[in-house]
Image (cartoon, rainbow, N blue to C red):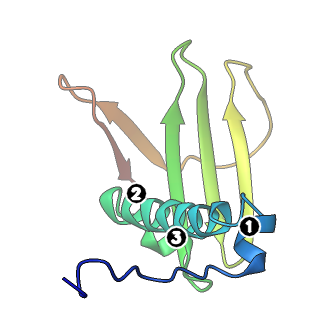
Amino acid sequence: MRYLKRRRRTDYGQEALEDPISGVANLFDASIVFIVSMMIALFMAYNMIDLLNPEAEVTITKQSADGQIEVITKRGSEIKAQKVTDRKLSGQGEKLGTAYRLNDGRTIYVPE
């Protein structure tokens, strides 16, 4: 019976009693690790690992819901975003080739 009456002494220390939010720091660290892992997973899912490579050249074209087209170009550490407009331009130059739109929506450029 002596073993049943023995009580375990719990000593959490004075710090645990004074700071009830001390466990939140661990949650913050875990959330940062989760966010970084989700970013890496998204980069890998969309095959955009080249965006992290400082020597790679990447061009991405995206179209918004209202039809606005934006071309994002990355060369080295420089990133440019350009919006495509319907404005007509004029100037002098030479013809480089012809572009064709196929029935399935793809565009093919044929150089001269």
Which of the pair 4/79 is nearer the observer? 4
Question: Alpha-carbon neighbours of circle 3 within 10 Å: few (<14), some, or many (≥20)?
Answer: few
Comparing 22 with 45, the one in front is 22
In the rendered structure, the answer to whether residue 8 lies left or right of residue 102 reads right
Quarter holding the C terminus is bottom left
The residue located at (80%, 37%) in the rendering is 91
Q: Which of these two is toward me, 12 or 91?
A: 12
On the image, the x and y values in percent for residue 49 come to: 44, 72
What kind of residue is marked 2? Leu
Which numbered marker is on residue 33? 3
Identify residue for label 1. Answer: 17
- The image quarter in which residue 48 lies: bottom left
Q: Residue furthest front?
A: 1
On the image, the x and y values in percent for residue 46 come to 35, 56
Q: Which three-letter amino acid code belongs to the residue tagged 1?
A: Leu
Q: Residue at x 70, y 82 (%)?
A: 13
Q: Secondary structure at mark 2?
A: helix
Residue 55 lies in quadrant: bottom right
Q: Which mark is residue 42?
A: 2
Question: Badge 2, how many Cα within 10 Å: few under 14, some, many 20+?
Answer: few
| Disc nearer the start of the sequence (2/1) | 1
Residue 45 lies left or right of residue 39; in this view the side is: left
Describe residue 101's horizontal placement relative to residue 29 as left or right.
Answer: left
Amino acid type of the residue that numbered disc 3 sits on in the rendered structure: Val
Q: Is residue 74 left or right of residue 34?
A: right
Give the spatial CA distance, label 2 vs label 3.
Answer: 14 Å
Of the numbered discs 2 and 3, the one sitting upstream in the chain is 3
* Mark toward the start of the polypeptide (3 vs 1): 1
